[in-house]
Every structure is written in C-alpha cells, then in structure tokens.
Image (cartoon, helix red, strand yellow):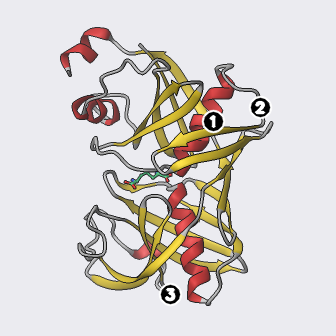
C-alpha cells in the first residue's frame, strides 16, 4: 500500500491514496502510522478519496480522532494531487467534512486555500501552564480558542493539555497563544485537539487572525503568522478566509502489508 509523507510549515502528515475508498482506516492504524517510534510519525493522516469524480480529504488526528478540517493538511493534499498527476497545477476543489474548499497550487510549491468563514462565537478562557488567558472562540469548521497575550508565547509550557470550558466546547478545542509582533504580523503557538503541541496549525492561524481582528472590533484584515515551523499568510474577508503557505512532499514508499494487517 502506497504512502506519501509531507508537511505544511512542519505540521506533518501521512498521505494515504485510497481513490476507490477501500481502506479500513481504524483508530489503531492511524495511531500506529502517526507514532514516531513504532510507525512513520506524523501529526495526522490524510486519506485521499475520490467519490463520483470529487476529491475528499478524510483527515484524522494522531490519536485516531476525526476532525472536520485541517488547513495545513489541505495544502499538502492539494500538492499531492498535482504531484501524482491527478490534477493540473492551478485551481480545483477538495471536499472536507467542513464543506467544499477551493485550493490554488502555485509553481513555487505554495498553496492558497479558501478556508471558508472564520466565525467568532464569543469569548472564553484557556488555562495554560497555570494561567488563565482570555480569547475568542472561533469556528473555522473545527473549534478554536485563540488567545492574544502580552506574555511571550515562547515562555509557556504546552506539554499538558490546556483547560477549557466544556460547555462552550463540548467536542474539545484547539488552543492558540498569540503575540502581536509587528504591523499585521503575529506569532502563534498551538495545542491541537487530538495531537498535542504541533509546529503549526493552518485552521489555528486563521482563527488567530480572526481573534486578533475581533479584539480591535474588526471583521476583515490580513496578517502574516509566524509559527514554530515557518510562516503563513492569512486574509479574513466578510464571508470567507484564505490561507497561503508552503506544502512539501518529503518521501513516498510502501507500507509493510503484514504490519498493516496485524493492526486491524
Ligand atoms: N493541523 C490542522 C488541524 C487539525 C485538526 C485539529 N487537531 C482538530 O482536532 O480540530 C490544521 O492545519 O488546521
């Protein structure tokens, strides 16, 4: 069974081409694939499915849970489709659990995703490293609590999961810590639901820009977002948002059939 390994600003994924929707992708198999000692190692899995001529990104977190959307994963997914000859360079549509998303692949390897609306749902508090930090709840298809803070984000420990209000976030939440580092320039760290701290989160960068704008009473604007794994560019518009950043394919190979079968 073929696999491809790739990353977007060092948020890394195992891509599993399954065009005819045949794979039984169990929780145990996702966990083993993502394990950095006993598997390939990744923050998540992107299963590539084609149903009735439409692409679908089946995204799974490293713990095996299903998430609605993955912004960095979508760029890697798009890059894979072009690299494999399934799509021409340029614009096409990928279905996700959060809805259809238009992507544009660029000759320099970067990809621009239409990320859909970033909906600011209210305010809440994250408990991080023994500290309560206020932020905005932002729905980017998946849930985020994006917190702008004056304290340097480098100073926080994100080894333990942040606390959050389970009434506001009944299905869990991704928590972002954000510093404003210049004009229209943010720095972000993230603790992802179902993964832990990652070096980037595309939906998290969109939520961060929406939260930063909301803090100024604004609903539109653009910013660069520096993450541990690089930089992306986000624009928030009245009814949608866009995310531009790199997408890198690192390796391709074959999974061992007996290893895979033993995990069923
Ligand atoms: N890394 C992703 C987000 C993946 C899903 C997230 N962990 C969740 O459970 O909602 C991104 O780039 O957006």
* Residue at left offset 56%, top offset 43%: 74
Query: Which class describes the residues within 10 Å of circle 3: few (<14), some (14-19), or many (20+)?
Result: few
Q: Position of residue 121 (x, y in %)?
A: 45, 77
* Residue at left offset 69%, top offset 76%: 220
Q: CA gap, disc 1 to disc 3? A: 36 Å
Instruction: Residue 32: name its quadrant.
Output: top left
Instruction: Residue 258: name its quadrant.
Output: top left
Q: Is residue 214 above or below residue 230?
A: below
Nearest to the observer: residue 260 or residue 124: 124
Tag 1's secondary structure? helix
Tag 3's secondary structure? loop
Nearest to the observer: residue 35 or residue 23: 23
Residue underneath mark 1 = 78
Q: Position of residue 234 (x, y in %)?
A: 67, 63
Q: Earlier in the sequence, mark 3 or mark 2?
A: 2
Question: How many marks overall?
Answer: 3
Q: Quadrant of the N terminus?
A: top left
Residue underneath mark 3 = 150
* Residue at left offset 78%, top offset 40%: 106
Q: Earlier in the sequence, mark 1 or mark 2?
A: 1
Tag 2's secondary structure? loop
Q: Position of residue 213 (x, y in %)?
A: 62, 81
Q: Cβ–Cβ below 8 Å for labels 3 and 2?
A: no
Q: CA gap, disc 3 to disc 2? A: 41 Å
Residue underneath mark 2 = 89
Q: Position of residue 264 (x, y in %)?
A: 20, 21
* Residue at left offset 42%, top offset 21%: 21
Tell which residue pokes out farthest to the right in this image: 107
């Amino acid at each position: 069974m073929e696999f491809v390994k790739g990353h977007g600003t060092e948020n890394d994924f195992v891509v599993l081409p399954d065009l005819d929707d045949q794979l039984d992708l169990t929780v145990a198999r996702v966990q083993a694939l993502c394990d950095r000692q006993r598997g390939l190692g990744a923050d998540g899995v992107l299963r590539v499915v084609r149903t009735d001529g439409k692409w679908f990104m089946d995204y799974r977190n490293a713990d095996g849970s299903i998430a609605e959307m993955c912004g960095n994963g979508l760029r890697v997914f798009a890059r894979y489709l072009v690299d494999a000859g399934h799509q021409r360079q340029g614009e096409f549509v990928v279905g996700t659990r959060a809805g259809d998303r238009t992507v544009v692949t660029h000759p320099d390897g970067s990809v621009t995703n239409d990320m859909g609306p970033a909906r600011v749902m209210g305010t809440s508090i994250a408990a991080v490293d023994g500290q309560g930090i206020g932020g905005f709840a932002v729905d980017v298809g998946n849930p985020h609590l994006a917190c702008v803070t004056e304290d340097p984000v480098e100073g926080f420990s994100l080894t333990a999961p942040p606390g959050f209000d389970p009434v506001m976030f009944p299905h869990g939440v991704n928590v972002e810590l954000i510093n404003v580092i210049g004009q229209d320039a943010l720095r972000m760290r993230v603790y992802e639901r179902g993964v832990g701290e990652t070096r980037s989160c595309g939906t998290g960068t969109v939520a961060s820009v929406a939260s930063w704008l909301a803090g100024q009473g604004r609903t539109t604007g653009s910013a660069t977002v520096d993450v541990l794994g690089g930089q992306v560019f986000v624009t928030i518009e009245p009814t949608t948002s866009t995310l531009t950043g790199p997408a890198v394919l690192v390796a391709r190979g074959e999974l061992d059939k007996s290893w895979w079968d033993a995990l069923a």
